[in-house]
Image (tube, rainbow, N blue to C red):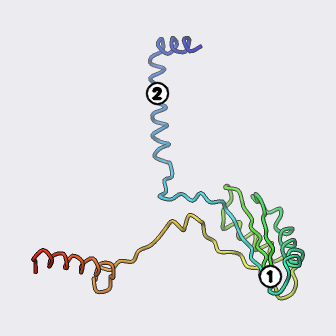
């Protein structure tokens, strides 16, 4: 089988060359259009619903808050799974969506369905913050060009001054 393929390739050098050039152009085009991010967001699309009901047992929170929210949320398009936890005075329902969905659209659908949930009076469920765990990789540093206000820069400058004085400088 391989011998036949090699023999065919050796007899049709122009065809093999054309296919090679075609693959090279296709690879260059694909490489040029490849999205590149410094820190790609690999986290799932998810929405959390957090409801506080102080003074109520976990079982009561489960029956009157968590289960009605889960029932109402089931069936949202692109929903992969629903997980929940009910503790003393707290209900957290976390929904994971597939990668083809848009997180803003997911949050909007959750808000629409959340308004139809029948909960005990004076309970206001809240949607958790829209952030990604990958966002914790980003850290910001504020630097000043004025050494009087830049503590790190002033510390380095004073350290350099001490070094110069120690070596017999001014």
Q: Where the C terminus falls, by quadrant? A: bottom left
Q: Position of residue 150 (x, y in %)?
A: 32, 82
Q: Position of residue 24 (x, y in %)?
A: 45, 33
Q: Toward which corner of the image does residue 105 lie, by quadrant?
A: bottom right
Q: Secondary structure at mark 2?
A: helix
Q: Residue at x 44, y 73 (%)?
A: 140
Label 1 belongs to which residue? 89
Q: In this image, 26 relative to 1: left or right?
A: left
Q: Position of residue 76 (x, y in %)?
A: 79, 63
Q: In this image, 29 relative to 53: left or right?
A: left
Q: Toward which corner of the image does residue 96 lie, by quadrant?
A: bottom right
Q: In this image, 24 relative to 59: left or right?
A: left
Q: Toward which corner of the image does residue 91 lie, by quadrant?
A: bottom right
On residue 20, the disc is 2
Ranked by sequence position, the earlier of labels 1 and 2 is 2
Q: Nearer the viewer, mark 1 or mark 2?
A: 1
Q: Residue at x 48, y 21 (%)?
A: 16
Q: Residue at x 54, y 11 (%)?
A: 3
Label 1: how many Cα within 10 Å (few below 14, some 14–19, many 20+) = some
């Amino acid at each position: 089988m391989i011998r036949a393929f090699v023999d065919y390739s050796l007899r049709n050098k122009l065809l093999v060359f054309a296919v090679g050039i075609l693959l090279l152009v296709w690879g260059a085009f694909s490489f040029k259009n490849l999205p590149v991010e410094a820190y790609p967001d690999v986290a799932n699309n998810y929405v959390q619903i957090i409801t506080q009901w102080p003074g109520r047992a976990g079982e009561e929170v489960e029956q009157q808050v968590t289960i009605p929210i889960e029932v109402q949320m089931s069936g949202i398009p692109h929903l992969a799974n629903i997980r929940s936890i009910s503790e003393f005075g707290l209900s957290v329902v976390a929904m994971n969506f597939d990668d083809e969905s848009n997180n803003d659209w997911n949050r909007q659908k959750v808000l629409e369905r959340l308004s139809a949930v029948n909960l005990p009076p004076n309970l206001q469920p809240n949607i958790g913050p829209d952030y990604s765990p990958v966002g914790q990789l980003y850290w910001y540093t504020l630097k000043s060009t004025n050494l009087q206000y830049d503590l790190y820069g002033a510390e380095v400058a004073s350290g350099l001054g001490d070094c110069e004085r120690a070596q017999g400088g001014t």
